[in-house]
Image (cartoon, grey):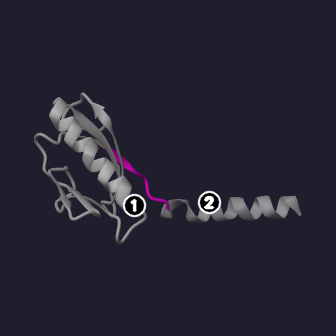
Amino acid sequence: MKKIILASGLFLAINFSPVISQGADICFDPAIQGYDMNGESKLSLWGVTGAANGLTADAKVSWHTEFSVASWYALLLKAQEMGKQVGVGYDPVSLEIWYIGHPIVCTSNSAL
């Protein structure tokens, strides 16, 4: 029985692995690139190579919470004040933000 379950799991993993999205990480400079908080639930980042319409995190239509979106916005403000950048992880297909890291020093809009 265990072998059947393992074989089934392996079969599913192999067949559906191309469906799993690979994330992208970039260095975002809030002092140079644009960002906006629309209301209390939607954060947008602009000036990202390969994302003509920008990256978004919207708590009303996604898994994000209003707290996470507000926290990420606060990190952007803090990084801009400190003259630093933040690492941003996102889905390159949907252009949805997955995370925004703490302020760091890196080259603007480069891969991490």
Query: Disc 1 on helix, strand or loop?
Result: loop
- Which callout, 1 or 2, points at the residue further toward the start of the chain? 2
Q: Is residue 8 left or right of residue 15?
A: right
| Distance (Cα) linking label 1 and label 2 | 32 Å
Number of the label disc, if any, that sits on residue 65 = 1
Residue 51 in percent (x, y) is at 21, 57
Query: Quick one: quadrant of the C terminus?
Result: top left
Q: Quadrant of residue 3?
A: bottom right
Q: Is residue 53 left or right of residue 67?
A: left
Residue 81 in percent (x, y) is at 16, 34
Q: Main secondary structure of the magenta part?
A: loop
Q: Residue at x 86, y 59 (%)?
A: 2
- Mark 1 touching mark 2, by CB under 8 A? no
Front position among marks 1 and 2: 1
Q: Residues within 10 Å of mark 2 (few under 14, many from 20)?
A: few
Q: Amino acid at mark 1?
A: Thr
Q: Residue at x 20, y 42 (%)?
A: 77
Q: Is residue 4 left or right of residue 29?
A: right
Q: Which residue is the extreme one toward the left? A: 32
Q: Residue at x 27, y 60 (%)?
A: 56
Number of the label disc, if any, that sits on residue 14 = 2
Q: Which residues are magenta?
A: 20-25
Q: Nearer the viewer, residue 34 or 14?
A: 34
Q: Which residue is the extreme one toward the top? A: 105
| 44 versus 61 height, above or below | above
Q: Is 86 inside the magenta-drawn segment? A: no
